[in-house]
Amino acid sequence: MAESIQEKAMDFERSRNQLMGVSSQKQQLQVQSSVLNDAVEELEKTKEKKVFKAVGNILVQADALATKKELNEKKESIDLRIKTLQKQEDSLINKLNKLKSEIESAQKGPASAESTVTETEKEEKGKDRK
């Protein structure tokens, strides 16, 4: 029984670490999505036909419409990855809640059984003394 609790506790810890990683990834992607959204909004405001975009460590001149399309595609891809990570996050949270309940009930189960035995033993000893 103690091994089962230990296994669940280890699984809980692994899942918690996995949740932190997924949440961190999701947060980074949300920042990227926000930056891309801002860039698209700026491209919509401009009347320029050509814009500069960063490619590695240099800026190159590119068509504004093509750049806007490229940024929108990147944003859609990132938003899809965010949705996938959100589903993973929800699944991990549910798993953690389930494991937490199982661990708590497993810890309460043997303890309450021991206290019941102890109370019964005390009562019997008390009867013996009378």
Image (tube, rainbow, N blue to C red):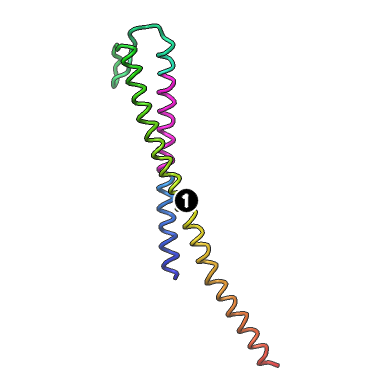
Tell me where residue 13 sits by quadrant: bottom left
Residue at the (42%, 42%) spot, across then down: 87
Q: Is the magenta stretch mostly helix, strand or loop?
A: helix
* Tag 1 residue: 94
Residue at the (67%, 88%) spot, across then down: 126
Label 1 secondary element: helix
Which amino acid, by three-letter code, is at mark 1?
Answer: Asn
Tell me if residue 58 comes above or below residue 129 in the rendering: above
Q: Is residue 57 left or right of residue 123?
A: left
Front residue of this view, candidates 21 and 90: 90
Residue at the (41%, 58%) spot, across then down: 10
Tell me if residue 124 comes above or below residue 52 in the rendering: below
Front residue of this view, candidates 19 and 83: 83
Q: Where is residue 49 in the image (x, y as percent from the top left)?
A: 34, 7
Question: Residue 73 in magenta?
Answer: no
Q: Position of residue 38 (x, y in %)?
A: 44, 20
Tell me where residue 21 sits by quadrant: top left
Q: How crowded is mark 1: few (under 14 residues within 10 Å), some or many (20 or more)?
A: few
Q: Magenta region: which residues? A: 21-39
Question: Residue 26 in magenta?
Answer: yes
Q: Where is residue 59 in the image (x, y as percent from the top left)?
A: 30, 15
